[in-house]
Image: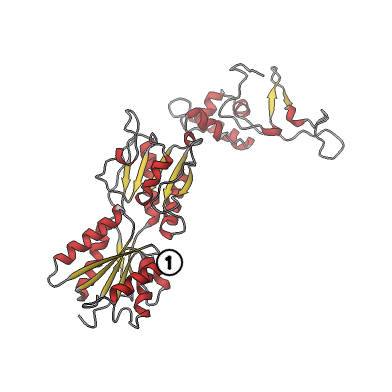
Amino acid sequence: MTRTADEARDPDEGTGGPGGSRSDGAGAERPRSADRDRDGGTRDGGLGHSEPLPHRPTSKDVARAAGVSQASVSLVLGDKWRGRVSADTAERVRAAAVELGYRPNVAARNLRLGSTRTALLVVPTLTNEFFARVHEGAAAVADRHGFGIVVYPSPDVTGRARDPFASARSALDGVIASSMAADALAGIGGGDLPLVMLDSDPDDGNDATGTSGRPGRPRGATVNLDIADGMRQTTAHLLGLGHRRLLHLAPDVTAWTFDVRARELAVAVTATPGATLRTVRAAFTVDAAREAVEHALTAPGPRPTAVVCDDDILAAGACKAVRRLGLRVPHDVSVTGFDDQSLAVALDPELTTVRLPAEQVGERGMTALLALLGHRPVTGGDIPVRLIVRGSTAPPAHP
């Protein structure tokens, strides 16, 4: 049945559902047809008499109870009343809403505003503690602002993802993506959505990472940890202990964050007289890391006295390799990690590693997206990191 604009439901009113009501044109309320059973009678709940379901209050009810217009109710409950209605009126509307138990139809209001208050978080995986904590931080900020987070893990770390959002892209307001899952953005699409990149080269340019650059649209933003300083702290610690033969265990994936670590490590070693550096790569598994380090430690020539790992999982594999060769950590070989996951204190000895505040990454990512959506500047520099010195590093026994 076609209804006129006056008869249409106010987008801010509560959803009536089966227990809702509609006006008969004279102000009286009567049950919806959904309240009737299949035989045409009203539901009786098995009590043998008609018992309509309770009516869910609408913005019309709030307006009637407060003695104001529906427009005033919308302004007050949308926190846009200042300068438009009096403080007394606002208080009266809020009191009526509380007394009636009114809850706005958020979905309908968002549809009217052209926003669903939903952000997409693209990460390599949620089984890695770092990215799980990133999600926690983003979700906490999103919740405070009435947003929801949809998480999409890229299936093979940096591989192109299938697009699961082709029919639902209009339900997304923006995207937050890890640089390690950047290739997945090509499969997901949504190039017209505001984009915040995490741990990504700030000099790459936002258009290269997927924003449209369309006039009037918010451009992308980047949220980074101070990864370079984290590696500088690590190398300063090891070189200060007297280590001069360093082995770098890097992941076998290409990402800006790992390029930064490799560059800073090489710069520090090159600047130190007598220091040498060798790099080997392994997949992000303990067994792959163990195998790579075993080969490196048994290769011809002087054995490295310290293994610098780009991740705590890789560091766990390095420690396992040292033990399998009959050596000791840190007496024979020192080992460092990156992330400070729970695994770091489960190892024996506990792992010296760079603590990355992953929750802050998620918080800053969501805050940056909110700024883009509000056409506000994104502020804040790189997030500081800190080296946590534990038992896996010591001066070399045989320099």
Number of numbered discs on residues = 1
- Where 235 falls versus 95 (above or below)? below
Kind of residue at disc 1: Ser
Give residue 36's quadrant in the image: top right
- Where 33 falls versus 189 (above or below)? above
Residue 7 position, x and y percent, is 63, 19
Q: Quadrant of the C terminus?
A: bottom left
**Callout 1: few (<14), some (14-19), or many (20+) C-alpha neighbours within 10 Å?**
few
Question: Circle 1 sits on which residue?
Answer: 342
Query: Seen in the image, is 141 located left or right of residue 60?
Result: left
Which residue is more in the foreground, 369 or 259? 259
Q: Residue at x 47, y 30 (%)?
A: 114
Q: Is any atom of residue 55 visible in this view?
A: no
Q: Quadrant of the N terminus?
A: top right
Which residue is more in the foreground, 27 or 230? 230
Give residue 347's quadrant in the image: bottom left
- Where 228 falls versus 305 (above or below)? above
- Where 46 falls versus 302 (above or below)? above
Q: Is any atom of residue 69 visible in this view?
A: yes
Q: Residue furthest right?
A: 48
Residue 52 position, x and y percent, is 77, 33
Give residue 368's quadrant in the image: top left
Q: Secondary structure at mark 1?
A: loop
Residue 21 position, x and y percent, is 69, 28
Q: Residue at x 20, y 63 (%)?
A: 266
